[in-house]
Image: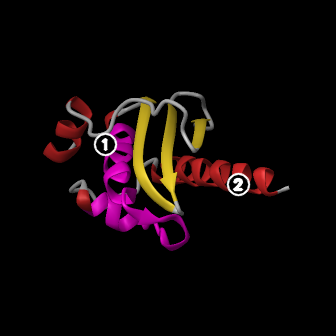
Amino acid sequence: MYSNIVLNLFNNPKNAGRISKPDGIADLYNADKTAHIEFSLRIDAGMIIECKFRAQANPYIVAICSTMTEMVQNKMIEMLFLEPYTIMKTLGDEQPINIDFCIDCMKLAIQNYKDKLEKYKN
């Protein structure tokens, strides 16, 4: 059912946890409230320095979140492009199951950071 990569990341997720005093954060439930994820970001000069996640979800979502945290670190937020096919291919599965939910949460965390910047400017 799940690829070995998905199972390994589910059992041993990378970057699990929460950043204290994050620069950007998002907390999201899926439509049917069966999954919950949170991304927290540390950003310096527009670059994601650190990204962590917490999830109460199925193995796919945990594996996707773990993979995404690795993909976004040391990337400029303005240049960030999260492509579902690339993420799923990394996991050894080409079906984008639950991926939009995960990408939306990451985008919300980045938007939270941008909103904070805008607030401090005014």
Q: Which residue is mark 1?
A: 63
Query: Which residue is depicted at the point 50% across and 40% down?
Result: 40
Q: Is residue 1 visible?
A: no
Q: Is residue 57 left or right of residue 33?
A: left
SS at circle 2:
helix
Most extreme residue toward the right is 122
Q: Is residue 49 left or right of residue 1?
A: right
Most extreme residue toward the left is 4
Q: What quarter of the picture does the N terminus occupy?
A: top left
What percent of the width, then of the height, locates residue 114? 67, 56
Look at label 2 and name its amino acid.
Answer: Leu
Query: Which residue is depicted at the point 32% across and 39% down?
Result: 15
Q: Is residue 96 above or below residue 32?
A: below
SS at circle 1:
helix
Q: Which residue is mark 2?
A: 117
Look at label 1 and name its amino acid.
Answer: Ala
Residue segment shown in magenta: 60-89
Is residue 76 rendered magenta in the image? yes
Query: Which residue is depicted at the point 24% across and 54% down?
Result: 91
Closest to the observer, 30 or 66:
66
Q: Is residue 10 visible?
A: yes
Is residue 45 rendered magenta in the image? no
- First reached walking from the N terminus: tag 1 or tag 2: 1
